[in-house]
Image (tube, rainbow, N blue to C red):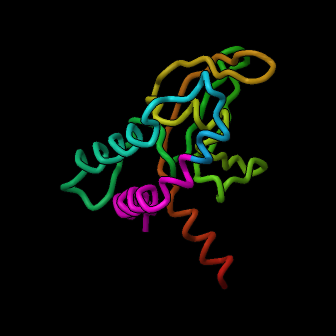
Amino acid sequence: MNHSNFSREFYKQQLVYIDENIKELTTLYLSSTPVQERIKNFFNLYVIEVEDLLSKNRNKGFISLFPKVFIGTKVTVLYDEDNESEDFVICFPEQSDPDRGYISFLSPVGRQLLLRKLGEQLSLRIPTGDLQMTIKDISYVGDLFELEEQYKEA
C-alpha cells in the first residue's frame, strides 16, 4: 500500500498536535529563530496552508500532490552552482536526525524550506554565505515517522 494514502489523516493529526502544543512550539520557535528572521504569526500561517491543502484534497482519501514543503515531506533541492541535489525530510524537533537528512522545521535550513513551492528558486542563508538552489521535488513521507515510532515501541 502506498503510504500517501494516509497523508490526509497525517495532516489532520498535525493540526491537532500544533493546537495542543502551541505554547511549547512557539517557545521553541522564538528561542531558535533570530529576531530578524522571525515571521509574525508563523504558526497561524502554517496552519492556514495545511488547512488549504486539506481543503483542496477533501474529496480524496489522500493527498497526491504537494505543491509546497510541509512538515512530513521530503524535499529535494538542486544546488545551482554545482548541479548537485540533496534531500531533506522536514520534521518536528523531536524527530530530527540530521545525519539521516531529517531536519526540524525550526532549524535554520528547515525554516527557510518550509512552505516553499515546487520549482521555486531561493537563496538559502547558511553561516558561510548564501547557496542558490531550486526546489526540484516534494513528496510525502509522514508515515515514516509512525513506522519508526512503532519500531521504537516494539
The answer to whether residue 4 shows anywhere in this view is no
Residue extent of the magenta highlight: 1-26
Q: Is residue 42 or residue 10 the one in the foreground?
A: 42
Residue visible at 40% across and 63% down in the picture: 13
Which image quadrant is residue 31 in?
Answer: top right
Nearest the camera: 22 or 71? 22
Q: Is residue 28 left or right of residue 54?
A: right
Residue 151, compared with residue 52, is above or below; it is below
Q: Residue at 73% of width from left, 53% of height from top? A: 97
91 shown above or below 107: below
Tell me, yes or no, whether the highlighted magenta stretch contains residue 13: yes
Which quarter shows the N terminus? Answer: bottom left
Q: Nearer the viewer, residue 8 or 39?
A: 39
Residue at (23% x, 57% y) in the render: 60
Is 138 situated left or right of 94 in this image? left
Count of all numbered marks drawn on residues in the image:
0
Residue 64 percent across, percent down from the top left: 35, 49
| Residue 7 percent across, percent down from the top left | 39, 58
Residue at the left extreme of this rendering: 59
Visible residue check, residue 124: yes
Observer-nearest of 2 and 151: 151
Q: Residue 16 location in percent, x, y? A: 39, 61
Say which residue appears at 78% left-offset and 49% top-offset: 99
Q: Quadrant of residue 14?
A: bottom left
- The quadrant of the image that shows the C terminus is bottom right
Magenta region includes residue 8: yes
Tell me which secondary structure the magenta stretch mostly adopts: helix
Q: Residue furthest bottom?
A: 154
